[in-house]
Image (cartoon, rainbow, N blue to C red):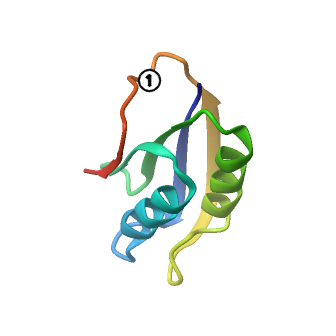
Amino acid sequence: MRKVRINVSGRVQGVGFRFVTKMLADSLGIYGSAKNEDDGSVTIEAMSQNDMSLEQFIEKVKRSPAPFGRVDSFNLEEDLTIPETNRFITN
């Protein structure tokens, strides 16, 4: 299973970014979480057995899945220590 942690900043809080990210994850079979950070960014932990689905998810997050969102900064890191889950949640 491939696991990644993504941190995005820009217009990503208060625009439905986490909600739409969850909808995207659910549609692609991606598990993990999305949470707002105190600095105004959003951290996403995402995992999938299907590398093509995960790549599609990553590309859509880079462009902001939320219509009124905007990603100015995008940081991705592979992290095998992210705990496995069988759903996608928003905190």
Q: Position of residue 33 (x, y in %)?
A: 38, 45
Residue projecting furthest to the bottom: 68
Q: In front: 40, or 3?
A: 3
Residue at 30%, 49% (x, y): give it.
38
- Secondary structure at badge 1 equals loop
Residue at 71%, 38% (x, y): give it.
51
Q: In front: 83, or 75?
A: 83
Q: Position of residue 66 (x, y in %)?
A: 50, 75
User: Mark 1 highlights which residue?
Assistant: 82
Is 37 left or right of 81, judged from the image as shown?
A: left
Can you say whether 58 is above or below 51 in the image?
below
Can you say whether 79 is above or below 28 in the image?
above
Q: Position of residue 27 (x, y in %)?
A: 52, 62
Residue at 51%, 47% (x, y): give it.
30
Amino acid carrying mark 1 in the image: Ile
Residue at 56%, 70% (x, y): give it.
65
Q: Position of residue 73 (x, y in %)?
A: 63, 55
